[in-house]
Image (cartoon, coloured by chain):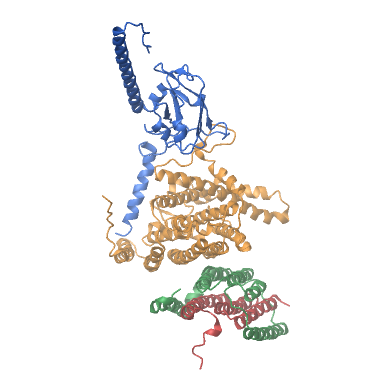
Chain colours: A blue, B orange, C red, D green
Amino acid sequence: MLGSGIINGLIVTAKNFAGSYHDPERMVTVEYPEQKTVLPENYRNFPFLITENATDPMGTLRCVACQICEKECPPQCIIIEKSKDKKPDATGKLQLYPAIFGIDTSVCMSCQICVEVCPFDAIKMDKVFEIATTDRFQDLFLDRERLAKPNSYYHEIHPVEAAEVDGRLLAERKAAEEKAKVAAAAKAAAAAAKPVVTPPPATP
Amino acid sequence: MSAAALTDSFLERAPLALRDWVVNFLPAPLQWLGHHLITIIAVLAVFGTFFAFTTIAERKLLARLQNRLGPNRSGLPWIKGLTLFGLSQPFADAIKTLTKEDIVPAAADKCLHFLAPVIVVAFSLMTFAVLPFGRHLIPVELDAALLYFFAAGAATELAIFMAGWSSRNKYSLLAAMRALAQLISYELPLILSVVPIVLVTSTLSTQNIVLAQGGWTFGFLPHWFVFTPWGFPAFIIFLVAALAESNRSPFDLPEAESELIAGHLTEYSGFKYALFFMAEYFGLTALSGLGVTLFLGGWQAPIAALQFIPSYAWFMLKLIGMLVFFIWIRGTLLRLRIDQLTRLAWQFLVPLALLNVGNAAFWILTASWSGPLQLIRWAISLAIIVIPFILLGRTLTAGYAPRTYRYAP
Amino acid sequence: MTPLHLCLLISSGLFCIGLTGALARSNTILVLLGIELMLNAANLNFIAFWRFGPAPSPANGMIFVLFAIAVAAAEAAVGLALIIAVYRHQKNIRLQEANTLRG
Amino acid sequence: MLGSAAAAMLLRNLIHSALLLILSWASVAAFYLWAGAEFAAFAQILVYVGAISMVVLFAVLLTRQNQVADVVIEPASRKRATTALTVGACLAGILSAAVVASRFPAAAVTAPATTVKLIGLELMERHGAALLIIGVILTVALIGATLLAATEAKRNPEDAP
């Protein structure tokens, strides 16, 4: 009959109305500042730098200031200045480190290219999105100190990816050690052939 | 409690007593002026706040109908954490619209552009003058009150046209044309749906119409016109036409956002926009009030035992009920197309309303039937309206099978 | 000068304005509106005589006015429909150009 | 009332003159109110301001060619205007002279007591035939207007605006 559709519609909305009071499942609204949605694992916005050790963030940056990300960055929001001296990195190898590392987040477009190109897994994407400030020049330009975050934080925000990265790094280090051992053994063999005293290989 | 005691109970007379008390402070020659001014101010104040809370109620209800929360943030200034369920939202909105820049397009007809919102508010407020809010509360007792109501309501169409034309904007003009077509089309069923009541009560005075709906069968079945076989279809037609007259969804074509930006409101901003908004709600409230007066027994209590509650409270309750129903409809139905809209008015509502007038005439002719004849009277009267409804519905929807939706695989 | 005189003066003024407009303007719509004005002037007279006339009858003047208003409404509707038909026919609503029947 | 009517007849902008005419009709209704004819006043507003004005505005918009819809006054039209003005002025003079010269019996002090009920009874009883005829006229006018405005479009659809 004519009009039955209208009545059906009214019943549906009335159910919505009643349901919205006793059935929290129906409500889709998240009252933002108090409640927050759980971000998906692959959410990303701005990059950060990984440090190995939380107690000494500046000393244990993974970044070796190779400047690949600076060159690849499409909007050119990364500024890096190499250090004059060298520091030992996680494996004990002497490496350069960034004396200045800055990202202008007002320019960054969250493309993740810096992460893709980094050969040292030193720069990763962060999940912090509440970055509104009153000063767009100073507060949105993140320097080395504000960019550095420990590896444990990386594990927290991207657990799967971080585990994969750590596994790979470990494998690489092991491979490097094996290589070093092989090299040492070869050297030792050479030394045995030629009795010359050689210093022992550096232990990690 | 006798009827006389009820009419003179303290609560019933309280507003009048308050008014007389205030008026008595004025010198004698000014008393009549004070008398009327207080009436006007009371109507403005009551319906102004009513308007404010209708907007928030509408937003909250619509949200709930769509499983949302609605505005619940705004609290009192300087008090943190107190949100009052967002009840102070309309006041925040008012401050915002009042402080916005008032933009008048360079090509606009300045005079008409300014006059349109003024006229629309003035006339929509004028319609409140003849609504009986309570047993003793009616701003103006007019003999031809119904005619006055429709005459005052007719002028708002003109204001919408002025707004649309003076904006010198093609969307506004289109909206104005649409509004004219819609308002003329629905004015007819609106008035025709009221005619049966005038026939039966043989009066145009709203107060007398309400008085004619007094009384109860067995003390709990009120003699409201909506509970008669001619009153119910008239009420439905009235509801549909009232929705269309107040430009509300599903008949909000004149300001359809998705088609015409905002229709005749496109070039209005700030306070003028607020005036239009206000007028729209005033018009809706006035039409709801008229519906309550004509069909739902006005200020009469639904059960004889509940008469001790003052009459104006009943009126307000019913008014709120009507508005909630309108909001419910707005949250449910989709917007019509313009041809569907005019077709609905001319091919469906007008014939039915005309039949319903005949139905009411039959009801008057058979007023003396009683006993088992009463049942026959009900049956015939129902048949007069139900059979054409079904037949008309069949013919109009013939060829429109229930729609089957096909989705991309 | 009684109120009746004043009313009659006003209504005759309105009538003459309507007549002048109907004669002078070449836009058909305005001519029609001028005729409406003249009808209104006549209605004014009815009400004036009903109210201030020598022997007021209870409702006669009013009923005359109601009938006149109804007829005016019908006249306006038909007239404007005619105008639209003419406009569709020759893209113009100037009175002088609707002369295809002239001998 | 007179002013807005005169201005309406003089203005070049058709919409303005239509709106001014509506104002003039509304003031006629105000005059009815002043004279105590409430019912006629409300009927006047309902019919003129509510309905006829809408039809007029529709007609204006549907037949509009440019912003100022009225055509330019040409010499022929100017001659017409002067003739019309003369005729109007002469008629006004004659009518007002007649009005001023005529003597009416003393006016009734109070308005005749007219209730809606009385009007209704009078309409139905004494003027029943006239009411029927008016009904027929209105119906015929409605159908005629619809036919006039609609069939033309069907006959030559390429002409439709």
What residue sits 55% from the left and 33% below the top?
A133
Residue D39 visible in the displayed image:
no
x and y percentages locating residue D151 in the rendered image: 40, 78
Q: Is residue A145 left or right of residue B220?
A: right
Against A170, residue C53 (above or below) is below
Q: Is residue C1 left or right of residue D72?
A: right
Against A10, residue D59 (above or below) is below
Q: Given the current orientation, which residue lies at the most extreme front position?
A: A194
Q: Nearer the viewer, residue B47 or A5?
A: A5
What residue sits 55% from the left and 53% below the top?
B278
Image quarter of residue B78: top right
Q: Is residue B139 left or right of residue A61?
A: right
Against C95, residue B175 (above or below) is above
Image quarter of residue B397: bottom left
x and y percentages locating residue B328 in the rendered image: 41, 50
Q: Given the current orientation, which residue lies at the most extreme bottom position?
A: C103
x and y percentages locating residue B148 in the rendered image: 54, 64
**Tag count:** 0
Q: Nearer the viewer, residue B2 or A32?
A: A32
Q: Nearer the viewer, residue A142 or B112?
A: A142
Q: Given the current orientation, which residue lies at the most extreme left position?
A: B409
Q: Is residue C85 left or right of residue B33?
A: left
x and y percentages locating residue A120 in the rendered image: 40, 26
Residue A59 visible in the displayed image:
yes
Against B45, residue C78 (above or below) is below
